[in-house]
Image (cartoon, rainbow, N blue to C red):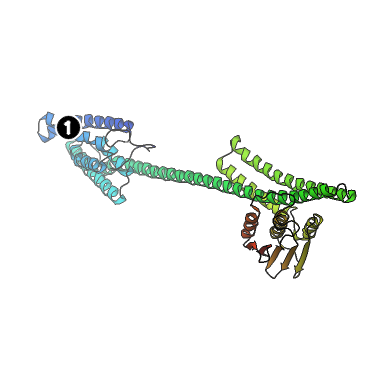
Amino acid sequence: MTTTGEEHTGGPTGPWWWARWRGAVLDGSLALVSAVECGAEGVPFARDAGIPVFLGVLFGVIAGSVLLVRRKWPIAVVLVAIAITPAEMGFLMGIVGLYTLAACELPRRVIGALAGMSLLGTMIVTFVRVRQSMASGDLTLGDWFVPFAAVTTSLGLTAPPLLFGLYVGARRRLMESLRERADSLERELQLLAERAEERAEWARGEERTRIAREMHDVVAHRVSLMVVHAAALQAVARKDPEKAVRNAALVGDMGRQALTELREMLGVLRAGEDVVGRRGAGVPLAAVGEAAAAAADRAVGETVSGDGPCLSELDELIGQSAAAGMVVELSVMGEVRSYAAQVEQTAYRVVQEALTNVHKHAAGAKTHVRLAHRVSEIAMQVENEAPPEPGSASAAGLPSGGNGLVGMRERVAALGGVFVSGPTDAGGFRVSAVIPAA
């Protein structure tokens, strides 16, 4: 079926081959007018042909009614209009048929051939009729008028509907192309919005995981040392007041450091809440997704490149553990140099978490911290000997969540490094990590 009518936004709702009832009513009206016209023109045709008048009228009505199928069979309509041209019938059908044919999605050679046939037929009929009128004396113009009338009449009945139909068809195809492009862009925008939402959700999940690791490192280490110092403070409060005062000061300093780091992470969380809150303010989904993802990326970048721990603070970290009663030895091999902030923070956190585990599970055990600066990587190892009193993992009764080793492995793996941990043959425990320098 060939469609030449209005654009359709939904499925067909009209009868038979019409997409809409409006098109069916229009074609029915045109067919009725064409049938009346051809029926009226059938009267002189019947007289000239010498047949009964009612047969000429019936022939004209049937021929004019063919215009009803112009949308389904436009070629048939044009052929019928060409066929009844010698009878001087179907002027409306010829004009509407040529317009419909030109507006259809048919090959141009087919449209050109039928238009040429219609032009030639109209020209011949007009030439003959005008010549007969001049021969009978109805027209007294010169001989030049016969070809002039034939050419102008044929062009006037053929060119306008043909050109208008070509214009309408081209415009319809352009509108269809623009509609398809708009639909495609809408689908792409929806897909981008979904991807942005997924990326935002992934970024939020990554940020939650990162913050959970940071909070675990901060809380586990600082609070572990605070508990150890508090236990020591309780033990020496009466015997050595000066040492008790020093331990109390250390507990206060560690508590303030823990609170400072926790406030920084809570500030990152509040910044993320501000971005997510835009969703309820009518901001488009794609914009919210991209903003949330960007906020998460900025939060990670700010935390990594901000005032986080670095390798130069290892001496202070080991000093805090030594102040809590742990015997710790630090050995550094290779040329000391600076690394990317994320590399230094990860190396620091590995050592920090390993020392925290010693406080929890091997209180009083001697610990060795080794740091090696290599050409393209940095290696660290924290190894503790067997605790002096087996079975007394932590004199202070520190709890363990079991996430320390998992967090260290995730940190190192995220930078493309290698993490290994496990017990030693001597009854201690060893944590080793190698992180690429780049």
Residue holding disc 1: 42
Q: Position of residue 279 (x, y in %)?
A: 59, 38
Question: For the N terminus, which image quadrant?
Answer: top left
Please give left or right for residue 329 compared with residue 106 in the image: right
Please give left or right for residue 282 compared with residue 391 in the image: left
Badge 1: residue crowd in 10 Å (few <14, some 14–19, many ≥20): many
Q: Position of residue 346 (x, y in %)?
A: 69, 58
Q: Position of residue 384 (x, y in %)?
A: 72, 62
Q: Residue at x 12, y 31 (%)?
A: 55
Q: Nearer the viewer, residue 237 or 417?
A: 237
Total marks shown come to 1
Can residue 257 be seen from the camera position used here? no
Q: Nearer the viewer, residue 435 or 148?
A: 435
Question: Hey, which quadrant is residue 11 in on the image?
Answer: top left
Q: Type of residue at label 1?
A: Gly
Q: Nearer the viewer, residue 120 or 406?
A: 406
Question: For the C terminus, which image quadrant?
Answer: bottom right
Secondary element type, mark 1: helix
Q: Residue at x 45, y 43 (%)?
A: 183
Question: Hey, which quadrant is residue 15 in on the image?
Answer: top left
Q: Position of residue 65 (x, y in %)?
A: 22, 33
Residue farthest along the right direction in this orientation: 242
Please give left or right for residue 13 compared with residue 40 in the image: right
Q: Nearer the viewer, residue 10 or 409?
A: 409
Can residue 218 be seen from the camera position used here? yes
